[in-house]
Amino acid sequence: SVLSIIYNGVGKRFIRFGKGEFGLNDKSYSVSAKIAEDTSDILFRERVAQLEKFLLRHWHFPFSISGDEEEILLYRWWKSQRFYFDKLGEEQKAEIERINNQYAGLYIEKRAYEWNNKYAILINFISDNQRTPSRDSTGMEKMLYDWHKKVKKDLKANKLDTEQERKAAMIEELLKE
């Protein structure tokens, strides 16, 4: 695409000023363009702060599919920072590496994240009610019943990963008590 050609040419033929602003390397630009270049670092730091706030609130990196538009925008920004890592300044590279190292344990697929959430909800339901969700229920309890039934079926069919198998066994153990 044209944008990838421009990004690949940054430092050679093109210069990047700010959020999506480019110019030719061999042409001089006004002071406002230089200000845009300075603000791009401010925008980067603001985005890093937003990402860290998101990570601490949600305990996972942003997902590409979400009902929250801000999460999707953070996902796209984070993906672009990693994709164009070589084009970043040294301070920005250091920040990206710091986030990768500091929050490495928060990389999780959306499907696994949702599985873990439903597991936690089911465990709380069983602890609070001293029983499994009812087949004839409605709403949240019906969702938990259907999910628990699927987990048991997936366990028998060996479709769960090791962690999920361990948690499924914990559910059954809790029900025996």
Image (cartoon, rainbow, N blue to C red):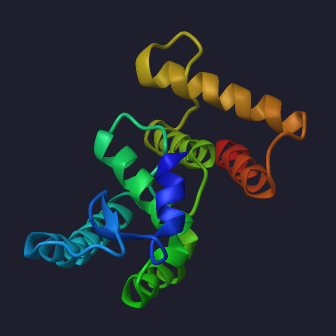
- Does any portion of residue 60 appear in the rendered image? no
Q: Is residue 15 above or below residue 57?
A: below
Tell me what residue is drawn at x 29 percent, y 46 percent.
Answer: 70
Using the rendered view, name the quadrant where residue 134 is placed. top right
Tell me what residue is drawn at x 55 percent, y 49 percent.
Answer: 113
Using the rendered view, name the quadrant where residue 18 is placed. bottom left
Position of 34 with respect to 174 (left or right) is left
Q: Is residue 172 above or below residue 22?
A: above
Of the 4 image quadrants, the one containing the N terminus is top right
Using the rendered view, name the quadrant where residue 156 is placed. top right
Position of 97 with respect to 157 (left or right) is left
| Residue sitting farthest toward the top | 136
Which of the two residues, 44 or 13, is positioned nearer the viewer here?
13
- Does any portion of residue 91 appear in the rendered image? yes
What x and y, as percent, mark residue 13?
A: 46, 70
Tell me what residue is drawn at x 56 percent, y 33 percent.
Answer: 131
| Residue sitting farthest toward the left | 31
Numbered circles on residues, count: 0
What x and y, as percent, mark residue 93?
A: 46, 83
Q: Is residue 17 above or below residue 72?
A: below
Which of the two residues, 140 or 176, is positioned nearer the viewer here?
140
Q: Is residue 139 above or below residue 9?
A: above
Tell me what residue is drawn at x 47 percent, y 45 percent.
Answer: 124
What x and y, as percent, mark residue 137?
A: 49, 14
Which of the two residues, 145 or 78, is positioned nearer the viewer here?
78
